[in-house]
Image (spheres, rainbow, N blue to C red):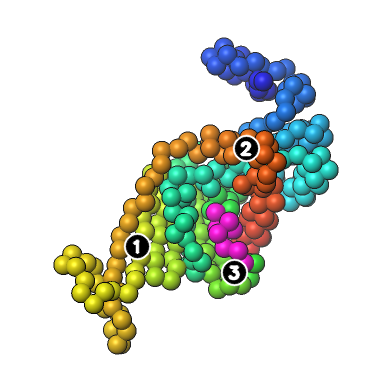
Amino acid sequence: MGFYDPDEFIAKEVEEKFGVKKFDSSDELIKACDIVDIVTPTISHFKCASAALKKFKHVFIEKPLTTTLTEARSLIDLANEANVKVQVGHVERFNPAFLATMPFIQNPMFIEAHRLSQFNPRGTDVPVILDLMIHDIDIILSIVKSPVKRIHASGVAVVSDTPDIANSRIEFNNGCVANLTASRISMKNMRKTRFFQKDSYIAVDFLNKESEIIRMQDAPENPGPFAMILNPGGGKKQKEVFVEKPEIKPINAIKTELETFYDSILNNTEPLVTIEDGYNSLDLAYKIMEKI
């Protein structure tokens, strides 16, 4: 239908370049459509989303869901009252490297994530936990189906008024431990996560869209000449090591997440990243910030 941007100069430029209708206010845009995609700074998410939900519009909203948990709870109530679909833009769930490894990730007991970024003034309106680490928080909560038992965290504000680099150790009731590091003052960009589980190790490079799976199984009595054999000692059975690189399909993650949201509306099914998922990630992010 079109778009709204409060910057008149940018709005005119986009309208001319892409041939998309520019609306003069967000209210006019909301009235004109069935679905609203909110890609504003986090501080205005609640205002825009609540206005759309009060008009019974389906809402796609970028992460983090809102600035505060109180706002997030209010949006959940509004969405339930309006009986519409809401999906949160945790786009890494649709990263092709992560999708390729999903069938292999089974009950990991240690997870290590590094999300490092070169400094960019965009995003410094929120702590690095809400800007970067929340991606990995969402990924981990989507995999580890167990309540959080304990959190340790530390962080430092270097160039802004809130933490620019942070580390958190999250312990779950099932024994899984996740160690997350996020920085927006690094010399290079990195988005890597490693999953360790019984008989396998899975590495996902979200930035370069690559993944690797190293798994072990009992070695045959007569292994092949090129087989990688591991002898654990102590009379234990030898293991054969396999290294696999799953096929990575060249998909556009942003397009894919919007398509899945469209499908959930069309088929009246639950979005792949629900508003409750967005709330749970935000809740854990705030608990990490409290520890810092």
Picture mark count: 3
* Viewer-closest of 144 and 156: 144
Please provide percent x and percent y for residue 187.
39, 46
Foreground disc of the pair 1, 2: 2
- Identify residue for label 3: 172
Of labels 2 and 3, earlier in sequence is 3
Residue 10 in magenta stretch: no
Q: Is residue 171 above or below residue 105?
A: below
- SS assignment at label 3: strand
Please provide percent x and percent y for residue 52.
76, 32
- Identify residue for label 1: 214
- Identify residue for label 2: 263
Distance, label 2 to label 3, CA atoms, is 33 Å
Residue plotted at (51% across, 44% down): 94
Q: Can the viewer see residue 286? A: no
Q: Circle 1: is it few (<14), some (14-19), or many (20+) Cα within 10 Å?
A: some
Q: Can the viewer see residue 224? A: yes
Judged left or right of residue 32, residue 170 is left
Please give the range of residues in magenta.
139-146
**Secondary structure, magenta segment, majority class:** helix
Question: Quarter-wise, where is residue 168 in the image?
Answer: bottom right
Foreground disc of the pair 2, 3: 2
Distance, label 1 to label 3, CA atoms, is 24 Å
Name which residue type carries label 1.
Ile
Name which residue type carries label 2.
Asp
Callouts 2 and 3 close, C-beta under 8 Å: no
